[in-house]
């Protein structure tokens, strides 16, 4: 029997701007850049986090002067809004209510989420969501251009 190991995931959306509110108050906002919804699984560690720290700043999904996606967030001087998203591990294969058993333990997930954010800050400005909070996010997608990444 083959057991699928599920690791860290990210949904990356190119945006013109985005803001995140908690209890009606703006907590974070960015202009041109990426909204990154990051899901940490129960089997993740720093190796998976390092993959995203290295890959996200160099991901060439911004257009150059010829309309080709040849520029990274570093090249365009963009920002990242990093949002923890355990629901990326929803398993709806049985019944109608998703199971989240593959999602990481909240304490460990928060630690790795912050680890990724601090690592990204070495290359690009990062704004954060509020881990575990009921967040309201408004974003103006650019394209739209969405990439799903897994490690």
Image (tube, grey):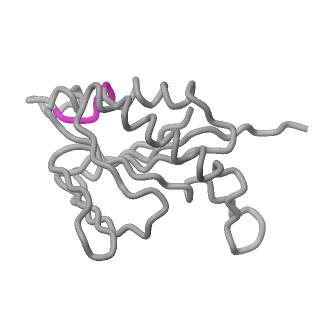
State the image quarter where residue 69 is shown.
top left
Question: Could you tell me which residue is drawn at 21 percent across and 55 percent down?
Answer: 29
Residue 136 is situated, as x and y percent measured from the top left of the image, at 34, 69
* 148 and 107: which is toward the camera: 107
Q: How many marks?
A: 0
Q: Is residue 100 left or right of residue 1?
A: left
Residue 86 is situated, as x and y percent measured from the top left of the image, at 55, 55
Q: Residue furthest right?
A: 1
Residue 121, above or below 111: above
Question: Could you tell me which residue is drawn at 28 percent across and 35 percent down?
Answer: 61
Residue 82 is situated, as x and y percent measured from the top left of the image, at 36, 47
Quadrant that contains the N terminus:
top right
State the image quarter where residue 17 is shown.
bottom left
Residue 98, above or below 12: below
Residue 150 is situated, as x and y percent measured from the top left of the image, at 54, 37
Quadrant that contains the C terminus:
top right
Question: Could you tell me which residue is drawn at 22 percent across and 43 percent down?
Answer: 33
Q: Is residue 108 left or right of residue 139?
A: right
State the image quarter where residue 71 is shown.
top left
Question: Could you tell me which residue is drawn at 31 percent across and 65 percent down?
Answer: 137
Asked if the stretch drawn in magenta spans residue 126, the answer is no
Q: Which residues are magenta?
A: 58-63
Residue 55, above or below 98: above
Asked if the stretch drawn in magenta spans residue 61, the answer is yes
Q: Is residue 131 left or right of residue 14?
A: right
């Amino acid at each position: 029997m083959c057991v699928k190991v599920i690791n860290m995931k990210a949904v990356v959306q190119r945006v013109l701007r985005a803001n995140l509110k908690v209890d009606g108050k703006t907590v974070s906002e960015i202009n041109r850049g990426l909204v990154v919804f990051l899901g940490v699984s129960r089997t993740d560690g720093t190796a998976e986090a390092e993959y995203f720290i290295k890959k996200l700043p160099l991901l060439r999904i911004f257009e150059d002067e010829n309309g080709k996606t040849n520029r990274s967030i570093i090249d365009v001087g963009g920002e990242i809004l990093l949002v923890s998203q355990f629901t990326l591990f929803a398993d709806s294969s049985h019944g109608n209510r998703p199971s989240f058993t593959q999602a990481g333990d909240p304490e460990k997930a928060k630690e790795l989420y912050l680890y990724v954010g601090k690592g990204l800050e070495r290359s690009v400005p990062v704004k954060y969501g509020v881990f575990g909070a009921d967040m309201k996010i408004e974003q103006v997608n650019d394209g739209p251009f969405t990439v799903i990444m897994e490690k």
